[in-house]
Image: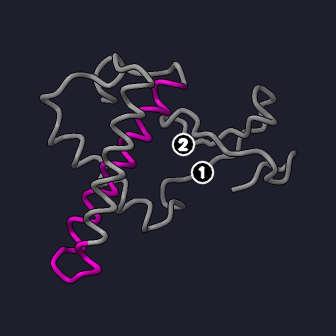
Amino acid sequence: MNCQECNGSGALIPGEIERNTVECPHCEGTGKDQEMEYEEVRPAVKWFATLMEQKLRENDHKANWTGCGIEYLMERLVQEYGELVEATWDLRKENGSPEEVIKEAADIANFCLFIADNASGNQTKDRGK
C-alpha cells in the first residue's frame, strides 16, 4: 500500500495494530495514514506471521526481548542465519526438511521483530502480548 503523498517513495512502518493502519514516515503526523484491513494482508504473510507467533509462544518461558541490547540481538540474528544456511544446505543435499528451513526462517524473522520492536521505542512490557 503506497502513501498517496509520497507515492510509495517512503518505507511503510506498521502503525498501531488496534487501528490496522500503516504509516509512511514521509506523511507521519499529517493524518494521511492509509487504512488497511486485515483481510488485505497477503495469505503468505498471514501464514508466516502465524509461524512466528507459534515460535514466540514456544519460548514464552524465556526472558523478555525488550531488555536485550542491539548487540546481543544482532549476534543472535547472525547465529540464526547460520542455522538457516545449514538447514537450507541440508535440504539441498536431500538430508534435510522443508519444515526445518521454515522453522529457521521464522526464528530469523522473530529476531528481526525484536530488533525493530526495541528500535521503535514502543515495546510492550509483556513480550508483545
Mark 1 or mark 2, which is nearer the start of the sequence? Answer: 2
Span of residues in magenta: 90-119
Q: Residue at x 28, y 46 (%)?
A: 53
Where does the image place residue 42, in percent across and percent down from the top left?
50, 65
Where does the image place residue 109, in percent across and percent down from the top left?
39, 48
Report the side of 110 relative to 25 (left or right).
Answer: left
Q: Element under label 1?
A: loop
Q: Label 2 crowding class (10 Å Cα cut-off): few <14, some 14-19, many 20+?
A: few
Report the side of 52 relative to 9 (left or right).
Answer: left
Q: Element under label 2?
A: loop
Residue at mark 2: 20
Q: Quadrant of the rendered structure where residue 120 is?
A: top right
Q: Is residue 52 above or below residue 77?
A: below
User: Tags 2 and 1 in contact by the CB under 8 Å rule?
Assistant: yes
Answer whether residue 98 is magenta in the image. yes
Give the camera-side residue of 8 and 82: 82
Report the side of 107 relative to 19 (left or right).
Answer: left
SS assignment for the magenta stretch, majority: helix
**Quadrant location of the N terminus?**
bottom right
Q: Label 1 crowding class (10 Å Cα cut-off): few <14, some 14-19, many 20+?
A: some
Counting every numbered tag in the picture gives 2
Report the side of 16 relative to 26 (left or right).
Answer: left
Amino acid, disc 2: Asn
Residue at mark 1: 36
Where does the image place residue 9, in percent across and percent down from the top left?
81, 50
